[in-house]
Image (cartoon, rainbow, N blue to C red):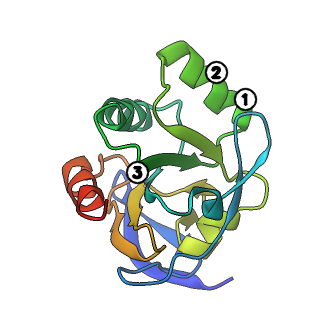
Amino acid sequence: MEKNNTKITSKGNPLTLIGKEIKVNDKAVDFSVANNSFQEVKLSDFDGKVKILSLFPSIDTGVCSKQAHVFNKEASALSNDIEILAISNDLPFALGRFCGAEGIENITTLSDHKNLDFSSKYGFLIEELRLVARGVVVIDKENIVRHVEYVPEITDEPDYNTAIKIAKEYI
């Protein structure tokens, strides 16, 4: 699998991203992940909506938990034409447990653990850790990528405001 040239770190230590780097104006590639019940979910299941992909390494860390909470809160105030998909390589059990315990109801948590289909197609797979790198991708209703953020330091939060602003522009 090809290496992505995007530079990211974890606590200052360089990490390697695998997969084709996704860029603004690319046609969004369909992918398959699992929901909290282990059922297959595809990007194409959300055709006709603006999609915000909230990407993170592990729901059981502070920054990832905060990212889920921030997007969950934001989602409650957004149009029904915007869908927030939170994707990690966590097991569906862990995502379901977290959402239940934390009251996360406004975003859809999805797992890429089985086939790494999303992370390898979008260039978010961290080779050394087999985790999804932190970032955000916004895809419009016609499945064109309108915003991409690979967070340079995975222990930092993404730019929530920019992602939400861009998503609203494509309703």
Mark found first going from the N terminus, 2 or 3: 3
Which residue matches tag 1? 93
Q: Name the residue under label 3.
A: 81
Local secondary structure at mark 2: helix
- Indicate the secondary structure of the residue bearing disc 1: helix
Q: How crowded is mark 2: few (under 14 residues within 10 Å), some or many (20 or more)?
A: few
Q: Do the residues labelled 2 and 1 touch (CB within 8 Å)?
A: yes
Distance (Cα) linking label 1 and label 3: 28 Å
Please indicate whether residue 163 sits to the left or right of residue 10 in the image: left
Q: How crowded is mark 1: few (under 14 residues within 10 Å), some or many (20 or more)?
A: few
Depicted 111 relative to depicted 18: above or below: above
Query: Helix, strand, or loop for circle 3?
Result: loop
Q: Eyeballing the image, is 119 above or below 3?
A: above
Mark pair 2, 3: CA separation: 27 Å
Amino acid found under the numbered disc labelled 3: Asp
Name the residue type under label 1.
Phe
Amino acid type of the residue tagged 2 in the rendering? Arg
Residue at label 2?
97
Q: Residue 142: x and y, percent?
A: 46, 74
Residue at the image point whose x is 64% and y is 48% from the top: 89
